[in-house]
Amino acid sequence: MKTHQTLLLAAALTATTGLTQADTVLGVYAGVGIWQPDISGKLGEVPISASDLDIDDDNANFLYVALEHPVPLLPNIRLQQTSIDNSGNSAISSDFRLGDISFDSGEQVSTKLDLTHQDAVLYYEILDNWVNLDLGLNIRRYDGHMSVTSANESERVSLDGVIPMIYGKAQFDLPFTGWSVAGEANVISYSGDGITDYTVKIAYASDIIPLFDVGFEVGYRDMSLDLEDLDDLVADVSIDGPYAALTVHF
């Protein structure tokens, strides 16, 4: 019995030691935040401005988790969910068409615009010291829609498609301070569609809690969509504004 207990204790100590060692070569990064974007541009086949639809600049929210490891040739991975769901009510000042339905100037309409999307980023660390450079591929899936309803008509078009995007991130750490500055980009342009998504940020992380680094980041994100052939939604819009997030690394 004592031998069995001794073996269990030895196994537990070995596992604990292995996890401690793994933490020196494996990194898990996670964050959750709020984005406060303004929406501008035009929507619809016969376009109308987002301001004419009086689409509210509601807060968006996002969360992400990333795993970095030392295995050669195997990319690191980052998964992110961004929820953007806006609405508006207005008496429009110009004619426009969404999908197969036309709406006339002066009509009172209710609008919903959902630009929610998920990112799966596969990337390599080209540089990893006080200057960090990541390059890779982002597989982005939009899972949204736009709907417009008047007293007599209603139309809904989807934004549901998967887009490969070039991904890059550059980060500069200020040694021994916990502070860093970074810029990130996701870009694609093809077949009449184009998406650019840029972020700049300042971040701070502290190891005040054992085994964890906790911190925050504040920055500015600008996502522009020029959509014609991705799905049903035709749009040329920009969504940009400041954001803030809480972060953890272990």
Image (cartoon, grey):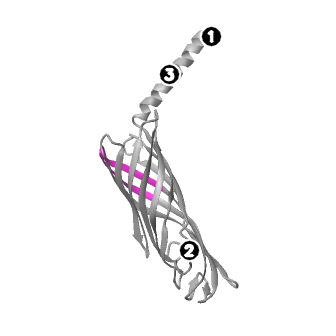
Tell me: residue 149, above or below residue 12: below
Q: Earlier in the sequence, mark 2 or mark 3?
A: 3
* Residue 82 in view: no
Q: Residue reaching furthest right?
A: 152
**What residue lies at 50% left-to-right and 63% top-to-bottom?**
36
The answer to whether residue 57 is seen in the rendering is yes
Q: Which residue is mark 1?
A: 1
Which callout, 1 or 2, points at the residue further toward the start of the chain?
A: 1
Amino acid tagged 3 = Leu
Q: Residue 179, image x and y in percent?
A: 35, 46
Mark 2 sits on what residue? 55
Alpha carbon separation for disc pair 1 and 2:
70 Å
> How far apart, in angstroms, are the residues tagged by discs 2 and 3?
58 Å
In the rendered view, would you say 14 is above or below 142? above
Mark 1, mark 2: which one is toward the viewer? 2
Residue 206 x/y as whole percent = 41, 40
- Alpha-carbon distance for marks 1 and 3? 19 Å
Task: Specify the segment rendered in magenta.
Answer: 120-138
Looking at marks 1 and 3 on the same chain, the residue that comes earlier in the sequence is marked by 1
Residue 122 in the image: x percent, y percent? Answer: 43, 52
